[in-house]
Amino acid sequence: MSVGIDDISFYSSSLCVPLTELAMRYGVDPDKYRIGLGQEEMAILAVDEDVVTMGASAAWPMLNDENRGNIGTLLFATETGIDQSKSAGVYVHRLLTLDSNCRVVELKQACYSATAAVQMACALVMRQPERSVLVIASDIARYGLGTLGEVTQGCGAVAMLIKSDPRLVEVCPESGCYSEDVMDFWRPNYMDTALVDGKYSTIVYLKALRQSWKHYQQAGGIAFPGFSRFCYHLPFAKMGEKAHRKLAVTCGESMSDALLTEQIGSGLIYNRKIGNSYSASLYIALLSMLENDTEDLSGWNIGLFSYGSGCVGEFFAVTVQPNYQAYSRRKAHVDQLESRQVLSYDEYAVLFGQHSPRIDGEHDFLKMTNGRFRLTGLHDHKRIYIETTVC
Ligand code: HMG
Protein backbone atom coordinates (compact mmCIF):
# COMPACT_ATOMS: atom_id res chain seq x y z
CA MET A 1 0.00 0.00 0.00
CA SER A 2 1.22 3.46 -0.80
CA VAL A 3 1.03 6.22 1.88
CA GLY A 4 1.96 9.87 1.61
CA ILE A 5 0.86 13.46 1.17
CA ASP A 6 -2.55 13.68 -0.45
CA ASP A 7 -2.94 17.46 -0.14
CA ILE A 8 -0.79 20.35 1.07
CA SER A 9 -1.43 24.03 1.69
CA PHE A 10 0.40 26.89 3.42
CA TYR A 11 -0.40 30.16 5.13
CA SER A 12 2.05 32.85 6.04
CA SER A 13 0.96 36.04 7.79
CA SER A 14 -0.57 39.06 6.05
CA LEU A 15 2.44 41.35 6.64
CA CYS A 16 6.03 41.33 5.39
CA VAL A 17 9.14 43.50 5.40
CA PRO A 18 11.61 43.63 2.49
CA LEU A 19 15.17 42.91 3.64
CA THR A 20 16.32 46.04 1.78
CA GLU A 21 14.61 47.95 4.63
CA LEU A 22 16.87 46.24 7.17
CA ALA A 23 19.93 46.69 4.96
CA MET A 24 19.23 50.43 4.75
CA ARG A 25 18.65 50.75 8.50
CA TYR A 26 21.82 48.85 9.45
CA GLY A 27 24.02 50.26 6.67
CA VAL A 28 24.60 46.79 5.18
CA ASP A 29 25.02 46.02 1.46
CA PRO A 30 21.57 44.61 0.43
CA ASP A 31 23.41 41.94 -1.58
CA LYS A 32 24.56 40.36 1.67
CA TYR A 33 20.93 39.41 2.34
CA ARG A 34 19.82 38.90 -1.29
CA ILE A 35 22.85 36.92 -2.51
CA GLY A 36 24.77 36.03 0.66
CA LEU A 37 21.70 34.59 2.44
CA GLY A 38 19.41 34.23 -0.59
CA GLN A 39 16.50 36.05 1.05
CA GLU A 40 14.21 38.82 -0.26
CA GLU A 41 11.50 39.41 2.34
CA MET A 42 10.43 38.08 5.70
CA ALA A 43 6.89 37.44 6.87
CA ILE A 44 5.91 39.35 10.01
CA LEU A 45 3.15 38.30 12.31
CA ALA A 46 0.19 40.63 12.92
CA VAL A 47 -0.68 41.21 16.60
CA ASP A 48 -3.81 39.07 16.25
CA GLU A 49 -2.08 36.06 14.65
CA ASP A 50 -0.15 33.17 16.21
CA VAL A 51 0.67 29.53 15.49
CA VAL A 52 -2.96 28.53 15.99
CA THR A 53 -4.44 31.05 13.54
CA MET A 54 -1.69 30.36 10.98
CA GLY A 55 -2.10 26.58 11.32
CA ALA A 56 -5.89 26.73 11.01
CA SER A 57 -5.63 29.08 8.02
CA ALA A 58 -3.18 26.70 6.31
CA ALA A 59 -5.48 23.70 6.75
CA TRP A 60 -8.84 25.35 6.05
CA PRO A 61 -8.72 25.28 2.20
CA MET A 62 -8.04 21.50 2.20
CA LEU A 63 -11.07 20.51 4.25
CA ASN A 64 -14.55 19.69 3.04
CA ASP A 65 -17.60 17.78 4.31
CA GLU A 66 -16.25 14.59 2.73
CA ASN A 67 -12.73 14.46 4.21
CA ARG A 68 -13.26 16.27 7.54
CA GLY A 69 -14.89 13.35 9.36
CA ASN A 70 -12.24 10.93 8.09
CA ILE A 71 -9.38 12.62 9.95
CA GLY A 72 -8.55 10.33 12.87
CA THR A 73 -5.55 12.27 14.20
CA LEU A 74 -4.29 15.86 14.17
CA LEU A 75 -0.54 16.16 14.78
CA PHE A 76 0.52 19.76 15.49
CA ALA A 77 4.27 20.41 15.15
CA THR A 78 5.68 23.64 16.58
CA GLU A 79 8.54 25.10 18.59
CA THR A 80 6.51 28.25 19.28
CA GLY A 81 4.38 26.69 22.00
CA ILE A 82 1.64 28.87 23.48
CA ASP A 83 1.03 26.75 26.56
CA GLN A 84 3.05 24.33 28.66
CA SER A 85 0.15 21.87 28.88
CA LYS A 86 -2.52 22.33 26.26
CA SER A 87 -1.70 21.47 22.67
CA ALA A 88 -2.12 24.33 20.19
CA GLY A 89 -3.73 21.67 18.01
CA VAL A 90 -6.78 21.47 20.28
CA TYR A 91 -7.69 25.09 19.46
CA VAL A 92 -7.18 24.28 15.77
CA HIS A 93 -9.35 21.19 16.11
CA ARG A 94 -12.28 23.44 17.14
CA LEU A 95 -11.60 26.15 14.55
CA LEU A 96 -11.57 23.50 11.81
CA THR A 97 -14.70 21.78 13.24
CA LEU A 98 -12.97 18.39 13.22
CA ASP A 99 -14.69 15.30 14.59
CA SER A 100 -14.70 14.94 18.37
CA ASN A 101 -13.32 11.41 17.94
CA CYS A 102 -10.13 12.79 16.39
CA ARG A 103 -7.02 12.52 18.63
CA VAL A 104 -4.85 15.65 18.93
CA VAL A 105 -1.27 16.10 20.12
CA GLU A 106 1.57 18.65 19.82
CA LEU A 107 5.12 17.62 18.86
CA LYS A 108 8.39 19.49 19.49
CA GLN A 109 12.02 19.17 18.38
CA ALA A 110 12.93 22.54 16.90
CA CYS A 111 12.43 22.63 13.11
CA TYR A 112 12.47 18.83 12.85
CA SER A 113 9.14 17.96 14.54
CA ALA A 114 7.01 18.18 11.37
CA THR A 115 9.03 15.31 9.90
CA ALA A 116 8.46 13.22 13.02
CA ALA A 117 4.76 14.03 12.56
CA VAL A 118 4.81 12.96 8.88
CA GLN A 119 6.54 9.66 9.73
CA MET A 120 4.15 8.97 12.60
CA ALA A 121 1.20 9.87 10.39
CA CYS A 122 2.35 7.40 7.71
CA ALA A 123 2.62 4.66 10.35
CA LEU A 124 -0.89 5.46 11.63
CA VAL A 125 -2.32 5.31 8.10
CA MET A 126 -0.56 1.97 7.50
CA ARG A 127 -2.40 0.68 10.58
CA GLN A 128 -5.80 2.14 9.62
CA PRO A 129 -5.73 2.83 5.86
CA GLU A 130 -9.30 4.12 5.75
CA ARG A 131 -8.46 7.01 8.13
CA SER A 132 -6.30 10.03 7.33
CA VAL A 133 -4.02 12.17 9.50
CA LEU A 134 -3.83 15.95 9.41
CA VAL A 135 -0.29 17.21 10.02
CA ILE A 136 0.10 20.93 10.73
CA ALA A 137 3.48 22.62 11.26
CA SER A 138 3.33 26.25 12.38
CA ASP A 139 6.09 28.49 13.69
CA ILE A 140 7.36 32.02 14.27
CA ALA A 141 11.11 32.69 14.01
CA ARG A 142 12.19 35.58 16.27
CA TYR A 143 15.76 36.49 17.16
CA GLY A 144 15.44 40.16 18.15
CA LEU A 145 16.15 43.58 16.65
CA GLY A 146 19.78 44.24 15.79
CA THR A 147 20.88 40.60 16.19
CA LEU A 148 22.74 38.68 13.47
CA GLY A 149 19.79 36.29 13.24
CA GLU A 150 17.26 39.10 12.66
CA VAL A 151 17.31 38.85 8.85
CA THR A 152 16.60 35.12 9.10
CA GLN A 153 13.30 35.62 10.95
CA GLY A 154 9.92 34.80 9.40
CA CYS A 155 6.75 32.84 10.09
CA GLY A 156 4.42 30.41 8.40
CA ALA A 157 2.39 27.25 8.62
CA VAL A 158 1.88 24.26 6.39
CA ALA A 159 -0.90 21.68 6.54
CA MET A 160 -0.71 18.20 4.99
CA LEU A 161 -3.27 15.47 4.68
CA ILE A 162 -1.55 12.08 5.01
CA LYS A 163 -3.52 9.29 3.34
CA SER A 164 -3.30 5.94 1.63
CA ASP A 165 -2.98 6.14 -2.17
CA PRO A 166 -2.00 9.82 -1.97
CA ARG A 167 -2.59 12.18 -4.90
CA LEU A 168 0.64 14.21 -4.55
CA VAL A 169 3.63 12.26 -3.23
CA GLU A 170 4.26 8.84 -1.73
CA VAL A 171 6.56 8.89 1.31
CA CYS A 172 9.14 6.11 0.84
CA PRO A 173 9.71 3.89 3.91
CA GLU A 174 13.53 4.17 4.09
CA SER A 175 14.94 6.99 6.18
CA GLY A 176 18.22 8.00 7.81
CA CYS A 177 18.38 9.84 11.14
CA TYR A 178 21.03 11.61 13.22
CA SER A 179 20.61 12.95 16.76
CA GLU A 180 23.15 14.67 19.01
CA ASP A 181 22.84 16.86 22.12
CA VAL A 182 24.31 20.20 20.98
CA MET A 183 23.63 23.86 21.83
CA ASP A 184 23.48 25.53 18.43
CA PHE A 185 20.04 27.11 18.84
CA TRP A 186 17.51 27.01 21.66
CA ARG A 187 14.83 29.08 23.41
CA PRO A 188 14.49 28.76 27.18
CA ASN A 189 10.93 28.94 28.57
CA TYR A 190 11.53 32.44 29.97
CA MET A 191 12.47 33.95 26.57
CA ASP A 192 10.41 34.87 23.54
CA THR A 193 13.38 35.18 21.20
CA ALA A 194 15.76 32.37 20.30
CA LEU A 195 19.40 32.08 21.40
CA VAL A 196 21.71 30.95 18.63
CA ASP A 197 25.36 30.30 17.89
CA GLY A 198 24.83 31.16 14.22
CA LYS A 199 28.01 29.94 12.51
CA TYR A 200 28.13 26.82 14.69
CA SER A 201 24.49 26.06 13.83
CA THR A 202 25.32 25.95 10.10
CA ILE A 203 28.21 23.55 10.80
CA VAL A 204 26.02 21.23 12.87
CA TYR A 205 23.30 21.37 10.18
CA LEU A 206 25.80 20.12 7.57
CA LYS A 207 27.17 17.45 9.89
CA ALA A 208 23.62 16.20 10.56
CA LEU A 209 23.02 16.10 6.79
CA ARG A 210 26.13 13.98 6.15
CA GLN A 211 25.32 11.59 9.00
CA SER A 212 21.63 11.27 8.08
CA TRP A 213 22.57 10.58 4.47
CA LYS A 214 25.05 7.92 5.57
CA HIS A 215 22.39 6.24 7.68
CA TYR A 216 19.87 6.58 4.83
CA GLN A 217 22.23 4.75 2.50
CA GLN A 218 22.81 2.02 5.11
CA ALA A 219 19.02 1.67 5.34
CA GLY A 220 18.87 0.84 1.62
CA GLY A 221 17.89 4.31 0.43
CA ILE A 222 18.09 5.61 -3.14
CA ALA A 223 21.59 6.64 -4.34
CA PHE A 224 22.29 10.30 -5.26
CA PRO A 225 21.81 9.83 -9.06
CA GLY A 226 18.38 8.31 -8.40
CA PHE A 227 17.08 11.70 -7.29
CA SER A 228 15.97 14.42 -9.70
CA ARG A 229 15.20 17.02 -7.03
CA PHE A 230 16.10 17.78 -3.40
CA CYS A 231 14.40 19.89 -0.74
CA TYR A 232 16.13 21.07 2.42
CA HIS A 233 15.13 22.72 5.67
CA LEU A 234 15.58 26.39 4.80
CA PRO A 235 16.49 28.76 7.64
CA PHE A 236 17.51 30.92 4.67
CA ALA A 237 17.68 29.89 1.00
CA LYS A 238 21.49 29.91 0.78
CA MET A 239 21.60 27.19 3.46
CA GLY A 240 19.83 24.88 1.00
CA GLU A 241 22.48 25.62 -1.62
CA LYS A 242 25.31 24.98 0.84
CA ALA A 243 23.66 21.75 1.93
CA HIS A 244 23.20 20.52 -1.62
CA ARG A 245 26.81 21.21 -2.55
CA LYS A 246 27.94 19.42 0.62
CA LEU A 247 25.80 16.38 -0.17
CA ALA A 248 27.14 16.23 -3.72
CA VAL A 249 30.73 16.31 -2.42
CA THR A 250 29.89 13.59 0.14
CA CYS A 251 28.57 11.43 -2.72
CA GLY A 252 31.53 12.19 -5.01
CA GLU A 253 29.27 13.99 -7.51
CA SER A 254 30.11 17.24 -9.28
CA MET A 255 27.66 20.12 -8.90
CA SER A 256 27.61 22.98 -11.40
CA ASP A 257 25.60 26.15 -10.67
CA ALA A 258 23.12 25.15 -13.40
CA LEU A 259 22.59 21.67 -11.95
CA LEU A 260 22.20 23.13 -8.47
CA THR A 261 19.45 25.49 -9.71
CA GLU A 262 17.78 22.65 -11.59
CA GLN A 263 17.81 20.29 -8.60
CA ILE A 264 16.77 22.66 -5.78
CA GLY A 265 15.83 26.06 -7.31
CA SER A 266 12.05 25.63 -7.58
CA GLY A 267 11.92 24.71 -3.89
CA LEU A 268 13.45 28.00 -2.77
CA ILE A 269 10.87 30.38 -4.29
CA TYR A 270 8.34 30.73 -1.45
CA ASN A 271 10.88 30.57 1.38
CA ARG A 272 12.82 33.51 -0.07
CA LYS A 273 9.70 35.62 0.59
CA ILE A 274 8.66 34.10 3.91
CA GLY A 275 11.95 33.63 5.76
CA ASN A 276 12.43 30.89 8.31
CA SER A 277 9.19 29.19 9.29
CA TYR A 278 11.06 26.59 11.37
CA SER A 279 9.04 23.31 11.36
CA ALA A 280 7.03 24.37 8.28
CA SER A 281 10.03 25.38 6.17
CA LEU A 282 10.96 22.01 4.57
CA TYR A 283 7.37 21.34 3.55
CA ILE A 284 6.85 24.85 2.18
CA ALA A 285 9.96 24.08 0.08
CA LEU A 286 8.38 20.84 -1.16
CA LEU A 287 5.15 22.67 -1.94
CA SER A 288 7.08 25.41 -3.74
CA MET A 289 8.76 22.75 -5.88
CA LEU A 290 5.54 20.93 -6.74
CA GLU A 291 3.86 24.23 -7.69
CA ASN A 292 6.70 26.00 -9.50
CA ASP A 293 8.99 23.47 -11.15
CA THR A 294 8.91 23.81 -14.93
CA GLU A 295 9.33 20.05 -15.45
CA ASP A 296 6.62 17.43 -15.00
CA LEU A 297 7.89 15.73 -11.84
CA SER A 298 5.55 12.70 -12.08
CA GLY A 299 7.35 9.52 -11.10
CA TRP A 300 10.47 11.39 -9.96
CA ASN A 301 12.12 10.98 -6.56
CA ILE A 302 12.67 14.03 -4.38
CA GLY A 303 15.19 13.78 -1.51
CA LEU A 304 14.13 15.63 1.66
CA PHE A 305 16.43 16.72 4.49
CA SER A 306 14.82 17.84 7.72
CA TYR A 307 16.92 19.54 10.42
CA GLY A 308 16.01 20.72 13.88
CA SER A 309 18.61 22.37 16.07
CA GLY A 310 19.61 20.74 19.26
CA CYS A 311 19.78 18.52 17.14
CA VAL A 312 17.91 15.92 15.02
CA GLY A 313 18.28 15.42 11.26
CA GLU A 314 16.47 13.04 8.93
CA PHE A 315 16.91 12.26 5.23
CA PHE A 316 14.12 10.50 3.37
CA ALA A 317 12.47 10.42 -0.05
CA VAL A 318 9.13 11.02 -1.67
CA THR A 319 7.97 9.89 -5.11
CA VAL A 320 5.77 12.30 -7.06
CA GLN A 321 2.45 10.83 -8.18
CA PRO A 322 1.02 11.03 -11.73
CA ASN A 323 -1.31 13.99 -12.34
CA TYR A 324 -0.21 15.76 -9.12
CA GLN A 325 -0.50 19.13 -10.91
CA ALA A 326 -4.30 18.81 -10.99
CA TYR A 327 -4.42 19.43 -7.21
CA SER A 328 -2.18 22.51 -7.11
CA ARG A 329 -3.15 25.55 -5.04
CA ARG A 330 -0.52 27.71 -6.70
CA LYS A 331 -2.76 30.66 -7.51
CA ALA A 332 -4.05 30.96 -3.94
CA HIS A 333 -0.51 30.73 -2.54
CA VAL A 334 0.96 33.28 -4.94
CA ASP A 335 -2.00 35.66 -4.37
CA GLN A 336 -1.52 35.32 -0.64
CA LEU A 337 2.15 36.30 -0.81
CA GLU A 338 1.50 39.12 -3.26
CA SER A 339 -1.35 40.64 -1.26
CA ARG A 340 0.66 41.03 1.96
CA GLN A 341 0.95 44.52 3.42
CA VAL A 342 4.55 45.69 3.05
CA LEU A 343 5.98 47.30 6.19
CA SER A 344 8.75 49.89 6.57
CA TYR A 345 11.53 49.16 9.06
CA ASP A 346 9.92 51.50 11.63
CA GLU A 347 6.49 49.85 11.32
CA TYR A 348 8.10 46.43 11.69
CA ALA A 349 10.12 47.50 14.74
CA VAL A 350 7.00 48.84 16.51
CA LEU A 351 5.14 45.61 15.76
CA PHE A 352 8.07 43.51 16.97
CA GLY A 353 7.83 45.21 20.37
CA GLN A 354 4.05 44.81 20.62
CA HIS A 355 3.97 41.13 19.78
CA SER A 356 4.48 38.81 22.67
CA PRO A 357 2.93 35.38 22.35
CA ARG A 358 3.63 34.62 26.03
CA ILE A 359 1.90 37.65 27.53
CA ASP A 360 -0.59 37.12 30.41
CA GLY A 361 -3.62 38.99 31.67
CA GLU A 362 -6.50 40.92 30.15
CA HIS A 363 -5.71 41.92 26.57
CA ASP A 364 -7.67 42.70 23.45
CA PHE A 365 -5.82 42.71 20.14
CA LEU A 366 -6.54 45.13 17.31
CA LYS A 367 -7.85 43.55 14.12
CA MET A 368 -4.84 43.50 11.82
CA THR A 369 -4.77 40.17 9.97
CA ASN A 370 -6.71 39.58 6.77
CA GLY A 371 -6.55 35.82 7.46
CA ARG A 372 -9.55 33.62 8.15
CA PHE A 373 -8.83 33.16 11.87
CA ARG A 374 -7.68 35.61 14.51
CA LEU A 375 -6.64 35.76 18.13
CA THR A 376 -8.90 38.45 19.58
CA GLY A 377 -7.49 38.54 23.09
CA LEU A 378 -6.33 36.97 26.30
CA HIS A 379 -8.75 36.94 29.22
CA ASP A 380 -8.33 35.11 32.54
CA HIS A 381 -5.18 33.60 31.00
CA LYS A 382 -7.29 32.04 28.25
CA ARG A 383 -6.66 32.64 24.54
CA ILE A 384 -9.71 33.66 22.53
CA TYR A 385 -9.80 32.63 18.87
CA ILE A 386 -12.50 33.35 16.32
CA GLU A 387 -13.20 32.75 12.67
CA THR A 388 -13.55 36.10 10.92
CA THR A 389 -16.05 36.85 8.19
CA VAL A 390 -13.31 38.36 6.00
CA CYS A 391 -11.12 35.75 4.26
P1 HMG B 1 26.27 36.78 9.48
O1 HMG B 1 27.45 36.86 10.37
O2 HMG B 1 25.40 37.97 9.40
O3 HMG B 1 26.62 36.47 7.99
O4 HMG B 1 25.43 35.49 9.95
P2 HMG B 1 28.02 36.33 7.22
O5 HMG B 1 28.89 37.49 7.54
O6 HMG B 1 28.56 34.96 7.45
O7 HMG B 1 27.49 36.45 5.75
C1 HMG B 1 26.55 35.57 5.25
C2 HMG B 1 26.93 35.28 3.81
O8 HMG B 1 26.77 36.49 3.04
C3 HMG B 1 28.39 34.87 3.60
O9 HMG B 1 28.40 33.89 2.60
C4 HMG B 1 29.06 36.14 3.07
O10 HMG B 1 30.20 35.92 2.28
C5 HMG B 1 27.93 36.71 2.23
P3 HMG B 1 29.04 32.43 2.90
O11 HMG B 1 30.45 32.66 3.24
O12 HMG B 1 28.27 31.86 4.10
O13 HMG B 1 28.81 31.67 1.65
N1 HMG B 1 28.04 38.16 1.98
C6 HMG B 1 27.75 38.72 0.79
N2 HMG B 1 27.34 38.20 -0.38
C7 HMG B 1 27.12 39.05 -1.43
N3 HMG B 1 27.31 40.41 -1.33
C8 HMG B 1 27.72 40.95 -0.18
C9 HMG B 1 27.97 40.11 0.93
N4 HMG B 1 28.38 40.34 2.21
C10 HMG B 1 28.42 39.12 2.83
N5 HMG B 1 27.91 42.27 -0.11
C11 HMG B 1 23.86 33.72 10.03
C12 HMG B 1 24.61 34.70 9.14
C13 HMG B 1 23.04 32.78 9.18
C14 HMG B 1 24.85 32.90 10.85
C15 HMG B 1 22.92 34.53 10.98
O14 HMG B 1 21.96 35.23 10.23
C16 HMG B 1 22.22 33.67 12.01
O15 HMG B 1 22.75 33.45 13.11
N6 HMG B 1 20.97 33.18 11.73
C17 HMG B 1 20.22 32.32 12.63
C18 HMG B 1 20.77 30.90 12.70
C19 HMG B 1 20.52 30.09 11.44
O16 HMG B 1 19.69 30.43 10.61
N7 HMG B 1 21.22 28.93 11.34
C20 HMG B 1 21.05 28.05 10.21
C21 HMG B 1 21.42 26.61 10.53
S1 HMG B 1 20.59 26.01 12.00
C22 HMG B 1 18.96 25.69 11.47
O17 HMG B 1 18.68 25.69 10.32
C23 HMG B 1 17.94 25.51 12.55
C24 HMG B 1 16.99 26.68 12.77
O18 HMG B 1 16.07 26.75 11.71
C25 HMG B 1 16.29 26.56 14.12
C26 HMG B 1 15.54 25.27 14.45
O19 HMG B 1 15.93 24.16 14.11
O20 HMG B 1 14.55 25.41 15.18
C27 HMG B 1 17.73 27.99 12.80
Image (cartoon, helix red, strand yellow):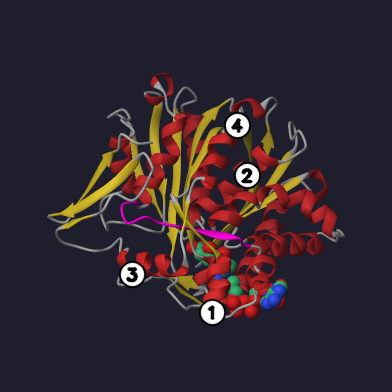
Q: Quadrant of residue 97?
A: top left
Q: Quadrant of residue 238?
A: bottom right
Residue 186 percent location from the top left of the image: 44, 70
Task: Indicate left or right for 232 with 148 as reference.
Answer: right
Question: What kind of residue is marked 4?
Answer: Ser
Examine the rendered structure and indicate whether residue 326 appears above or below residue 91: above
Q: Are marks 1 and 3 in contact (CB under 8 Å)?
A: no
Q: Quadrant of residue 257?
A: bottom right
Q: Secondary structure at mark 2?
A: helix
Crowd band around label 3 with a 10 angstrom C-alpha radius: few (<14), some (14–19), many (20+):
few
Whichever of labels 2 and 3 marks the residue nearer the N terminus, that label is 2
Disc 2 designates what residue? Answer: 288
Q: Secondary structure at mark 4?
A: loop
Disc 3 designates what residue? Answer: 353
Q: Residue furthest left?
A: 380
Range shown magenta: 39-49
Q: Residue at x 28, y 36 (%)?
A: 94
Of tags 1 and 4, which is closer to the observer?
A: 1
Does the Cβ of the disc 3 residue fall within 8 Å of ligand 1? no
Give the spatial CA distance, label 2 vs label 3: 31 Å
Image quadrant of ligand 1 equals bottom right
Is 311 magenta? The answer is no
| Viewer can see residue 181 | no
Whichever of labels 2 and 1 marks the residue nearer the N terminus, that label is 1
Q: Secondary structure at mark 3?
A: helix
Say which of 346 and 152 sits in front: 346
**What label does residue 118 carry, if any?**
none
| Viewer can see residue 16 | yes
